[in-house]
Amino acid sequence: MRNVAFSPEYAERYRQQSEILFRPENRRTKEEGCFANGYFLLCETYEGELDGEPRTAARYSLFTPNHDLLLSYDCLDNDHALSEMIKHNNGIVYYVFRRDRFGFSVFNLATLTEHRYYSDEALKTGSDFIWCGAEYYPDRNTIFVVGHVPGAPFEVYEFDFTDPMTCVAFVPEDALILTLPSTDFADEMEDFRDEYINWGEEDIIGSALLASFDDIAEWFAFVDTLGSRKTAPSYYMPSTPFVAFRMSDGLPVGMIEIKHELNDYMSKHGGHISYSVRPSERRRGYGKRILAMVLPYAKLLGHSKVLVVCHTDNEPSRRTILADGGVYEQTYFSELDNIYNENYWIRTTPAVVAEQSQANIVS
């Protein structure tokens, strides 16, 4: 899609909306947050209305550890505020943020230059993918972005990030996407389930009990209940299951499920995150990518770190967890499963950029 971030039409629309939102009477709070690398943000929030719709906006200022002002900008939609520090393979640290509901900006902390992107689709239709969180994946020079189209569930996309200053949300051919289960791909999920069964695997880890349902429609109905304690069955912790699709051919290559919270049982027998890759697609690095992709969503849920559990005899799973920054905590014997399990904690920022983090804005 064409980038119209600097077009006269978009600039005028942005100016008009800014004047409406950033009126003195709309000012609400002033907040401060600090990144782990010492840079910090000042944030002034505003509450106004655009086209009859309530809107929260914010005025940001980014400072160096020495309190020098680097960047000031207005964000016209501050719901799920995007503010990420990313250390690239090229050695440069970039600040990724949003100026509007759609689009994104990348600020080079070395050259103090900014790259902006806003699609012509968003300008024409008033709808596009909203960036809500991002994690850099150095193995592939890609960026995993969690977000959603207005009115739709969260998804996680993989975009090319080889050159951050020209990034236009390009999806590589072999990219993956994490999306919520949908009846739109019921046939694909039946094939996914049946492959495990045909390989003699009775359990599909990270699938929200998919193998337990002969009727795929009943499984979709079950998944729809899992989002909160009010609707989830009493025997099941609230969770979000994602299907990992390969973009090139639409094949579901795996599933991953993240628990919104832990009880005593899950803190020993399952952890926050469980996942699996379909048998025919294993040993291709998908497990590592899927686990890394879900971390920005875990951050949106409020998890600063997540617990991942594997059996002591599951060496592939152990390697995957360690490769995504897992830190060993303990080994214990599960009487229920009659097996030894290992606990690992993973920060919601990959270990390779562990010195960077999302700003923790505290009111």
Image (cartoon, rainbow, N blue to C red):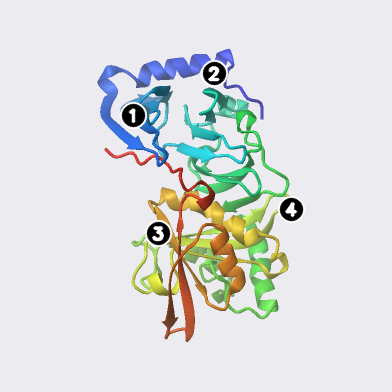
Which circle, 4 or 3, is nearer the viewer?
Answer: 3
Residue 312 in the image, given as x and y percentages of width and height: 53, 77
> Pointer 4 and pointer 2: residues touching (CB < 8 Å)?
no
The residue under label 3 is: 260
- Label 2, label 3: how far apart the Cα atoms are: 38 Å
Element at label 2: helix
Element at label 3: loop
In the image, 327 versus 54, the foreground residue is 327
The correct choice, above or below, for 238 with respect to 159 in the image is: below
> Pointer 4 and pointer 1: residues touching (CB < 8 Å)?
no
Which circle, 2 or 1, is nearer the viewer?
Answer: 1
Classify mark 4: residues with Cα within 10 Å, few (<14), some (14-19) or many (20+): few
Is residue 53 at all visible to an observer of this figure?
Answer: no
**Does 315 sit left or right of 280 as displayed?**
left
Classify mark 2: residues with Cα within 10 Å, few (<14), some (14-19) or many (20+): some
Which circle, 2 or 3, is nearer the viewer?
Answer: 3
